Image: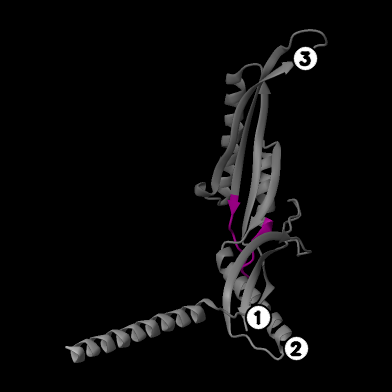
């Protein structure tokens, strides 16, 4: 009986020691896994890509004031139809014409110390014209844009709200700018780490922001003598990246 009891006590002691050992083992593993050692450097990189615009936009309009809204509307429509017809004859596609504003508003006279007096109605119609015609060298035909302006004004347009340009493959240029920005950031990080005898081991974080804006330059005037001169300039696509490198 005593022998059996002794063996039982020994077994309990061994089991207890084993459990305590397992418990300490888990504690040590957890402590090691919770400790992190990370050396990092955050660098800003920039990439800029320049390109000539290959799409142009011209906004022209007609503004007519008459005694009644009907008269103003009808005369405005007559002139605008005349402008559109002339543009189509030049080769402008109907799909490239977009009405961006149309309104008919009352016009009042405001005598001193008297109630406002209705004197007529103003009809306003704005048309956006998209130009994609190219020259033999692939550049946007700004001379054709000049012809369009001259044609529109000679057919009754009395409003010119602005001329703008854009790039059709801007998304591709942004990807190229991102590549340049990342290369710039990496180069800066490598130079900084070389001073302290360290090397890039990985990347922890990347933040990308992009912005595009026109940069106007002195480009050759391609417009004919009868049309106003138009310059496309160039447009830049700029990307900024903030990269956190691990070393």
Label drawn at residue 186:
1
Of the image marks 2 and 1, the number of the one nearer the N terminus: 1
Q: What is the spatial separation of the Cα atoms under label 2 and label 3, in whole angstroms? A: 76 Å
- Magenta range: 130-143
Nearer-the-camera pick, 46 or 237: 46
Of the image marks 1 and 3, the number of the one nearer the N terminus: 3
Nearer-the-camera pick, 211 or 6: 6
Nearer-the-camera pick, 176 or 158: 176
Nearer-the-camera pick, 155 or 210: 210
Instruction: Give the answer, above or below, for where 48 lies relative to 225.
Output: below
Label drawn at residue 110:
3
Q: Nearer the viewer, mark 2 or mark 3?
A: 2
Label drawn at residue 195:
2
Residue 111 lies left or right of residue 77; in this view the side is right
Residue 106 coordinates in the image, percent (x, y): 65, 19
Q: What is the spatial separation of the Cα atoms under label 1 and label 3, in whole angstroms? A: 67 Å
Farthest residue, direction right: 112
Q: Which of the 4 quarters of the picture holds residue 173?
A: bottom right
Q: Secondary structure at mark 1?
A: helix
């Amino acid at each position: 009986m005593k022998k059996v009891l002794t063996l039982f006590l020994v077994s309990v002691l061994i089991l207890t020691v084993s459990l305590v050992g397992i418990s300490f083992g888990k504690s040590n593993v957890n402590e090691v896994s919770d400790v992190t050692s990370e050396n990092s450097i955050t660098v800003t990189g920039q990439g800029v890509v320049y390109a000539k615009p290959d799409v142009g936009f011209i906004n022209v309009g007609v503004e007519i004031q008459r005694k009644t809204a009907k008269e103003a509307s009808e005369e405005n429509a007559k002139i605008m139809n005349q402008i559109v017809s002339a543009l189509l004859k030049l080769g402008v596609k109907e799909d490239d014409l977009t009405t961006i504003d149309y309104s008919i508003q009352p016009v009042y006279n405001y005598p001193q110390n008297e109630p406002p007096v209705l004197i007529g109605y103003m009809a306003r119609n704005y048309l956006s014209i998209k130009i994609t015609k190219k020259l033999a060298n692939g550049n946007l035909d700004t001379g054709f844009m000049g012809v369009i302006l001259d044609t529109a004004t000679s057919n009754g347009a009395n409003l010119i709200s602005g001329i703008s340009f854009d790039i059709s493959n801007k998304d591709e240029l942004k990807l190229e700018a991102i590549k340049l920005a990342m290369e710039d950031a990496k180069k800066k990080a490598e130079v900084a780490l070389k001073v302290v005898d360290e090397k890039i081991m990985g990347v922890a974080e990347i933040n990308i922001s992009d912005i595009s804006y026109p940069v106007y330059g002195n480009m050759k005037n391609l417009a004919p003598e009868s049309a106003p001169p138009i310059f496309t300039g160039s447009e830049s696509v700029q990307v900024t990246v903030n990269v956190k490198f691990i070393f």
